[in-house]
Image (tube, rainbow, N blue to C red):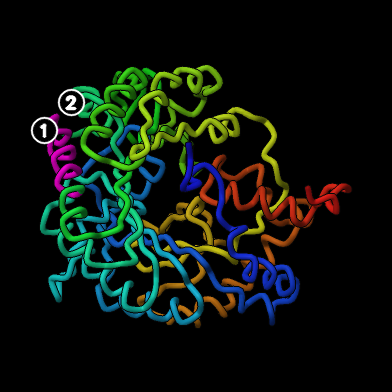
Amino acid sequence: MDKTRIEGQKLDMHPARVAHWLAAKDEWETAKNIFPIYMEVSPVGVCNHECTFCSVDYMLDREDAPRLEYTVLERALTDMAQQGLLSAMFAGAGEPLLYKDKATGKTLADVIVHADTVGVDTAITTNAVLLTEKFAERAFQAKRLRWVRTSLNAGDRETYAAIHRTKPEDFDTVLRNLENAVKIRERIGARVQILAQIVVVPEAQGKRRRSLLQENYPSNIHTVLPLATRLRDIGVDNLAVKPYKQHLVEKDVSRSNMYATVAYDQISKMFDDVEALETDQFEITIRRETMAHEDSAERGYKACYSTPYHWAYIEADGELWACSAHVGRVEHGKELGDHRFRLGNVNELSFMDIWHGERRKACWEYTRKSPAEGGLDVDTCMRGCQMDMPNRYLWDLMNPEPTRSFIK
């Protein structure tokens, strides 16, 4: 089952916004007022784990260890809500629950509560080591906190420690935190969904980023069934089983590039017994369609219609990017990422100034051009990116089948 449409897109549930995009996208004076529906935010640029499959590993060895100030987050969320932002997901390059504002002592739970007051739905993707009872008690007060998704990438302590590059005790901590979160939710009557996901990877051999040391990494495929059993018994709502995605920034020195050629056509068939664990209260989403897309040579669309319109991404240093797949930074005079997608910094400018600014206009022009005209070639983009499914939907809208009038 996939009642929450994890495997897919929800852009079709916003017909007025899509209609506005269709009418306004072709002229800058109208296109500049197409505002994001959804935003991803990385409140802190450091992590307490070093997962072997990390899709943003190149952002985690930066020297400045950035974090957004609470006043900046508060202002940005308020400004974006006034322009029609509906949702914000806190995740990004770092572990979001590490966030604590130096000046005020406020945590991500306070950010979540503020978003609630300005009408923005929120969600968190976390490794849940720091999903403490104190955090849950505060964050779960927000009625618009829709879900907390835990990245839990093995079903036993040893495999978990090897893939997360952490101590085995963290596995026990995470399961205990999830169990407590479920109890707190029930006690206070919160409606937040408690979710989990596992990125399935085979056994591999590779190196840490910018390391010469060759290491062996275990497969976690055999642990999916015991993980699903544990999570069902705890009271978690959903487990998503998903494929690895290879980022394209400094791919040759990535610590995750040993998974780049994984074929999921056979792996996806191994989970029928996992789906048998589903109950009315516990859903399992095997992301077979996404796995098939990872293996397919056909992308399904020839232009990115999501960027720079329907979503955006704020990095912990304040830079607002039109697409997280191209996020980067400048360090020692070297640019990482594709800075044609970097629109401006929320530490320095208001959201409106950035969204109406020259850098977004240039990004808008770039994504509209064909590759032959020097524009974006989506075939060079990260496969299975965040906007992959919305782009498939928008491509079909823009390139309809001749039989489209037959609506049944």
Q: Secondary structure at mark 1?
A: helix
Who's the residue at 83% across and 51% down the image? 404
Who's the residue at 36% across and 23% down the image? 206
Label 1: how many residues lie within 10 Å, few (<14), some (14-19) or many (20+)?
A: few
Measured along the vertical axis of the image, is residue 82 above or below residue 294? below
Quadrant housing residue 45 = bottom left
Q: In the image, is residue 178 part of the stretch drawn in magenta? A: yes
Q: Secondary structure at mark 2?
A: helix
Who's the residue at 41% across and 58% down the image? 329
Q: Residue furthest front?
A: 280
Q: Are marks 1 and 2 in contact (CB under 8 Å)?
A: yes
Question: Callout 1, which amino acid?
Answer: Glu
From the viewer's perspective, is 178 left or right of 150? left
Question: Callout 2, which amino acid?
Answer: Arg
Quadrant housing residue 195 = top left
Measured along the vertical axis of the image, is residue 268 above or below residue 191? above
- Residue 169: which disc? 1
Q: Nearer the viewer, residue 279 or 256?
A: 279
From the viewer's perspective, is 316 left or right of 378? left
Q: Which residues are magenta?
A: 167-181
- Residue 157: which disc? 2
Label 2: how many residues lie within 10 Å, few (<14), some (14-19) or many (20+)?
A: some
Question: At which x and y percent is residue 20?
Answer: 68, 73
